[in-house]
Image: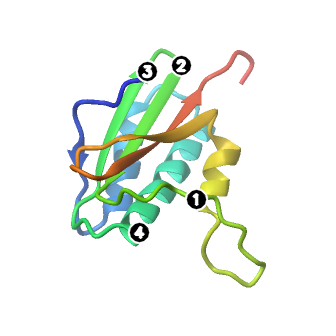
Amino acid sequence: MTDAPSHYVALDSQNPAAHARRLVEDACDSWPTAHVQDAQLLITELVANAMTHSAASTVHVHIATRPRILRVYVADDSAAPPIIANPSLEDEHGRGLRIVDALAHSWGTAAGPYPRGKAVWFELRLEDGR
């Protein structure tokens, strides 16, 4: 699963985060609830980042599943790489990628559907005993 996906879905412009969470829930319908909730939290963080740091009117996602593996891509038109911030206790923003880094088995960036944009992806795995 190292190649960038070829098919992205444009998120609903009225509530892109809710649309993204539904897509994850549909893709993980046989997963334990706690894992689905982790995936929904992670995609919400990446969609929020894309909406905040991109000029695109539409954010795109791609969800790839394999047995016991979920990989989610969230694409925007910004070429700027994601940065893990060090927010103070008073800061209201800046913790999203720390959450992604803590919960995902792996994450990174790939080429997205926009000419100069990127996709930020994360991967979750169901492991034995979990």
Q: Secondary structure at mark 1?
A: loop
Residue 83: numbered disc: 1
Using the numbered discs, state the Cα–Cα distance from disc 3 to disc 4 in whole angstroms.
26 Å
Residue 130 spot, x, y in % from top left: 71, 24
Q: Is residue 76 left or right of residue 29?
A: left
Type of amino acid under label 4: His
Depth check, front residue: 121 or 10: 121
Q: Which residue is mark 3?
A: 1
Using the numbered discs, state the Cα–Cα distance from disc 2 to disc 4 in whole angstroms.
31 Å
Q: Is residue 120 left or right of residue 54?
A: right
Q: Residues within 10 Å of mark 1 (few under 14, many from 20)?
A: few
Using the numbered discs, state the Cα–Cα distance from disc 2 to disc 1 in whole angstroms.
28 Å
Residue 68: numbered disc: 2
Q: Secondary structure at mark 3?
A: loop
Residue 74 spot, x, y in % from top left: 38, 48
Q: Which residue is mark 4?
A: 53
Residue 36, can we see it? no
Using the numbered discs, state the Cα–Cα distance from disc 3 to disc 1 in whole angstroms.
23 Å
Check the image and name the residue furthest to the bottom: 90
What residue appears at the point 21 percent right and 49 percent down from the top-left corner? 115
Type of amino acid under label 1: Ile
What residue appears at the point 74 percent right and 84 percent down from the top-left corner? 90
Using the numbered discs, state the Cα–Cα distance from disc 1 to disc 4 in whole angstroms.
11 Å
What is the image's colouring? rainbow
